[in-house]
Amino acid sequence: MRTPLILAVTLAMAGTAQAMHPSPLVEAEWLEEHLNAAGLVVLDVRSTIDDGGDRTAFEAARIPGSRYSNYAEDGWREERDGVAGLMPDVDDLARLIGGLGIDNGDTVIVVPAGTGPTDFASATRVYWTFKALGHDEVAILNGGFAGWERQGFETASGPLEPPEATAFSATLREELLASDAEVDASRQAGEQLVDARPEEFFSGARQSPATRAPGTIPDSVNLPHDDALVERDGAWYLEPERLTAAIDALGLDREAPTVAFCNTGHWAASGWFQLSEVGGFSNATMYDGSMAAWTRDDSRPVQLADRGVMTVGEMRD
């Protein structure tokens, strides 16, 4: 039988691990302080996006104790029915996460490469995935690996054995994932639709090859995913003050239902993270299909700055 003192110490240590609850965006100083905490998993997701690297780069230099999953190649998103970037089946994602040795009791710090705004969106998409699967103990390292390295924190190198797989239990939070029909209903109800793409996509001056027509969803507003990200000493950081100013300039209501979207649900994840997790929006969701899915239907409307509102079919005639 455990003595009361031993039991108290055990419970205190367990409580510390369970109560870590980092803010959604953590700085390198915070991570360095907590790097050896029980139940902390540092998940490096760098990929070729923004020249972030791959497993070879991870093995050359990484945060000590971190694990690796290539965001672009390992199954965090999938293509279905010609639409890129969709959320995979919940069970497939649970196997992916469990295969990284992550269980439901772990606190996960997602580490992008830190090499650009689109790379930062990789981390936000992984973060959103954990949240959508019911796992709240997750955060993103601001500045990514580049920021960690530039600030002079310790790095490790060399090949790693794969982590021991474990069971990860997932339950979909449907309120974080907007369907085509739900987005259409939001539009018709006059709810807030936030296009996270750069302005040239929002206006229709530029079209993604993933979409069937240029333009945006009518009556949406533009909050470019990259506007609040700045480069400092070779690494990219999200600046909450810049984000707050941009949100306030748009006059958005932080309590109102809000949908973030882009072309394929990548930049949209950054938009959702900035609105929900940093900006304080209490009812934000993400449209993973985004304009790639929206423009699959010829009857759906799109809005262009120079031509007004037209249907996808009219645009393609």
Image: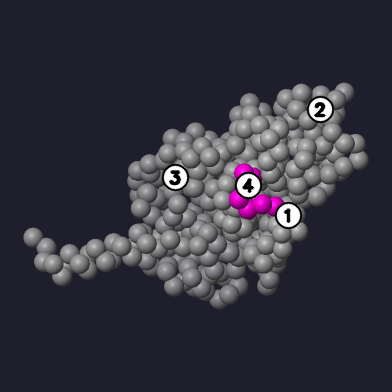
Residue 65 found in image quarter:
bottom left
Between the C-alphas of marks 3 and 4, the distance is 22 Å
- Sequence-earlier tag: 1 or 3: 3
Residue identified by numbered label 2? 311
Marks 3 and 2 in Cβ contact (< 8 Å): no
| Residue range corresponding to the magenta coloring | 252-258
Q: Which mark is residue 177?
A: none
Check disc 2 and give the amino acid type: Thr
- Sequence-earlier tag: 1 or 2: 1
Q: Main secondary structure of the magenta part?
A: loop
- Sequence-earlier tag: 4 or 1: 1
Which mark lies nearer to you, 3 or 4? 4
Q: Which mark is residue 134?
A: 3
- Sequence-earlier tag: 2 or 4: 4
Front residue of 295/191: it is 191
Secondary structure under the numbered disc 4 in the rendered image: loop
